[in-house]
């Protein structure tokens, strides 16, 4: 089990949820887990706990300042997402990276994000090429007009998870991103999951959750982070 924490940020005090493995965080691989548009809900904290059980130190920064949206209210979640101030959110995420570096004593981290968090994971990798070595966007979307990443600055290796039926981050959009990264000389792998839709990893959403695909996403993500960061 993890705990709610506070950390220093240029925006003041950052808040989030951190889960550490048995024995503590020192020397472990740090993973930033970025929320879906619902906020830091139970499914996100459980994902952090799951990373900790696998030997990682996982931190989920709370970009909504303690607010969250019920999973039955997508319109409200969309409003929260679009209300994010990108400069402030980017600074909060960067400060969370620094906190993970402090906790682990290492010089790089991995970033995993879901839905809007997947988009923000890519943004963060471009903002912090000095520290983000591996980035895993899961059905990631970037709906903010002012958040277009400059992928030329990114040094991280990318592994993206793409749902075949996803209307938010479609296979076509994924191919376009993969081609853009390849043209820039960036290393990336894109995994397509047949027959599943957006948010298939979220076990608290039975209308979207697909257990076999979710487990494969998890196994691939853990193996990738170990390969890139161990």
Image: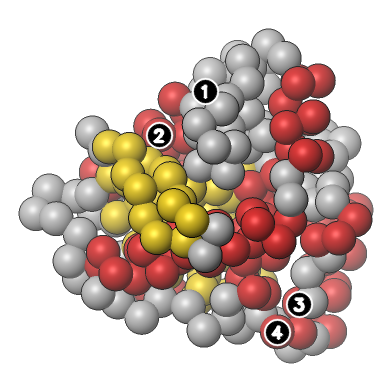
**Mark before the other along the chain sequence, 1 or 3:** 3
Instruction: Tell me how far mark 2 sits from mark 1, CA to CA.
Output: 12 Å
The Cα–Cα distance between marks 4 and 2, rounded to whole angstroms, is 30 Å
Q: Name the side, left or right, on which 9 lies relative to 128.
A: left
Residue in view at x 77 percent, y 48 percent:
141
Gap in angstroms between the C-alphas marked 1 and 3? 31 Å
Which comes before the other along the chain, label 1 or label 4?
4
Numbered disc in front, either 1 or 3? 3
Disc 1 versus disc 4: nearer the observer? 4
Q: Which callout, 2 or 3, points at the residue further toward the start of the chain?
A: 2
**Mark 1 crowd level (few <14, some 14–19, many ≥20, 10 Å Cα):** some
| Residue 223: % across, % down | 41, 60
As helix, strand or loop, the secondary structure at mark 2 comes to: helix
Q: Residue at x 58, y 44 (%)?
A: 63
Q: Read off the residue under disc 4.
A: 153
Distance in Å between CA atoms under marks 2 and 3: 29 Å
Circles 2 and 3: CB distance less than 8 Å?
no
Q: Is label 1 in a helix, a strand or a loop?
A: loop
Asked whether disc 3 touches disc 4, contact meaning CB atoms under 8 Å apart, the reply is: yes
Task: Name the quadrant containing residue 226.
Answer: bottom left
Asked if labels 2 and 4 touch by Cβ distance under 8 angstroms, the answer is no
Q: Secondary structure at mark 4?
A: helix
Instruction: Work out how far the residue at label 1 is from the one at label 4, CA to CA, in angstroms.
Output: 34 Å
Q: State the image coordinates of residue 74 (x, y, percent, origin top left).
A: 75, 20
Mark 2 Cα shell of 10 Å, populated few (<14), some (14-19), many (≥20): many
* Residue with the mark numbered 1: 203
Instruction: Judge whether 73 appears above or below 107 on screen.
Output: above
Numbered tag placed on residue 135 in the rendering: none
């Amino acid at each position: 089990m993890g705990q709610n924490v506070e950390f220093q940020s240029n925006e003041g005090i950052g808040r989030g949820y951190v889960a550490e493995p048995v024995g503590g965080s020192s020397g472990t691989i740090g993973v930033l887990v970025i929320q879906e548009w619902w906020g830091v809900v139970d499914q996100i904290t459980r994902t952090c706990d799951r990373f900790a059980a696998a030997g990682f130190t996982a931190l989920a920064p709370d970009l909504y300042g303690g607010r969250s949206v019920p999973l039955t209210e997508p319109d409200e979640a969309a409003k929260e997402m679009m209300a994010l101030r990108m400069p402030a959110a980017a600074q909060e995420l960067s400060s969370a990276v620094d906190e993970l570096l402090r906790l682990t004593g290492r010089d790089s981290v991995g970033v995993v994000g879901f839905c809007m968090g997947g988009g923000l994971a890519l943004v963060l990798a471009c903002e912090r090429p000095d520290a983000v070595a591996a980035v895993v966007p899961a059905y990631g979307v970037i709906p903010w007009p002012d958040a277009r990443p400059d992928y030329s600055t990114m040094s991280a290796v990318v592994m993206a998870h793409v749902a075949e039926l996803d209307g938010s981050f479609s296979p076509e959009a994924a191919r376009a991103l993969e081609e853009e990264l390849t043209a820039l000389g960036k290393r990336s792998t894109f995994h397509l999951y047949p027959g599943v839709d957006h948010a298939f990893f979220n076990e608290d959403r039975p209308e979207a959750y697909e257990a076999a695909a979710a487990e494969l996403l998890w196994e691939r993500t853990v193996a990738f982070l170990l390969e890139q960061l161990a």
